[in-house]
Every structure is written in structure tokens, then in C-alpha cells.
Amino acid sequence: MRKVVLITGASSGIGLALCKRLLAEDDELHLCLACRNMSKAEAVCAALLASHPTAEVTIVQVDVSNLQSFFRASKELKQRMIKKWLYVIRVEDHLQVSEIRPYISKCWDHA
């Protein structure tokens, strides 16, 4: 079973950089791109799959600043990701990509 990583803001900036970095280190991941703009997310998804064809990349539409959107996406993910490990990464502007990898490794060691 693939490890699932959900990344908010994955269609640009630090979120996109993190997606690329994680797939460069492990292209057997299942990345779930949590994005507001579906057209941008679909373009990013296609680009990631083109450069990492063995990866699994899916999209969930969510605006984390909108509670209704958040709950709808949570319900959708619960239905889609049942019986899968799910690691959620909320990318903030002050967070460095290098700070995230040790956290994920620590989580996976306990999975």
C-alpha cells in the first residue's frame, strides 16, 4: 500500500516545490494535491505524473480558509482514502522544505 501525503497549496510555491522534492526522493508515493483552483491543480498533476510516471497523484478541491469547503473535502477524502495512511502537510510561508522531510520520515517509521 502506498503512503499517502496530502499537501495544501500544492499548485504553486512551496507546496509545489515540496511535491517535486518528495517525488524525487520516493516516486512510489500517493500525493494528494489539496488546491482551490482545479485547473491549476490539473496542470500540476499532469506535470508531476509526466516526470514521475510511477507515482500516484490525485486532487481534492479545498479552500482551507472556508469551513464548508474544508468539511466537504474531509468527507471526500474519508471516502477515497479509507484504510490508507494519510499524512497531512499544511504548507506555510515560513516553513522550509528541509524541515518537512524529517517529520515525514519519523511518521513513516511508526506506520
Image: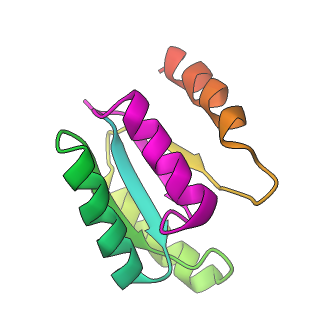
**100 up-or-down from 91: above or below:** above
Residue found farthest to the top: 109
Residue 85 is at least partly visible in this image: no
The image quadrant where one finds the N terminus is top left
Q: Residue furthest right?
A: 94
Residue 67 position by quadrant: bottom right
Name which residue lies at 25% across and 48% down. 51
Q: For this rendering, which residue is in front, 25 or 3?
A: 25
Q: Is 92 on the left or on the right of 111, as rendered? A: right
| Residue at 65% from the left image edge and 29% from the top image edge | 103
**Image location (x, y in percent) of residue 6:** 48, 52
Residue numbers of the magenta segment: 1-28
Q: Is residue 61 visible?
A: yes
**Residue 97 falls left or right of residue 42:** right
Coloring scheme of the render? rainbow
> Which quadrant of the figure has residue 65?
bottom right
